[in-house]
Image (spheres, grey):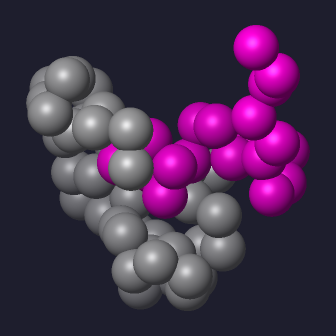
Amino acid sequence: MAEEKMPHPGHDRHLCYLTNLGFMLESPEEYKKLVKNSKYMCANCGRAANKAENLCKPIEL
C-alpha cells in the first residue's frame, strides 16, 4: 500500500490529523494530555493544544 502523503513534516503527530483518525475516541487520556491547559490554537482548523508542536499552524492564545 502506498504511504499517505502528508502536507508537511510532522503532520502525522498533529492534532489536526490525529483527530480525523479518531485519536480522541481511541486514546482519550492521551488526547487530554495534549489539550489540557491549552496555550496554542491552530490557525487552520481551530484545535487547541498545550504545545505548539502538536498543531499545524500554531498561534498563541
Q: In the image shown, does 6 or 10 lie closer to the viewer?
A: 6
- Residue 34 showing in the rendered view: yes
Residue 26: percent from left, percent from top: 19, 23
Determine the image quadrant of residue 7. bottom right
Q: Quadrant of the N terminus?
A: top right
> Is residue 24 shown in magenta?
no
Q: In the image shown, does 53 or 46 lie closer to the viewer?
A: 46
Residue at the spot x=65%, y=64% of the render? 56
> Is residue 18 shown in magenta?
yes
Residue 53: percent from left, percent from top: 63, 51
Residue at the spot x=51%, y=49% of the render? 17
Instruction: Tell me: residue 9, above or below residue 38.
Output: above
Instruction: Give the residues drawn in magenta, as a range.
Output: 1-19
- Residue 51 showing in the rendered view: no
Residue 10: percent from left, percent from top: 75, 41
Instruction: Tell me: residue 48, above or below residue 26.
Output: below
Residue at the spot x=30%, y=34% of the render? 23
Q: Quadrant of the C terminus?
A: bottom left
Looking at the image, which residue sits at the far top?
Answer: 1
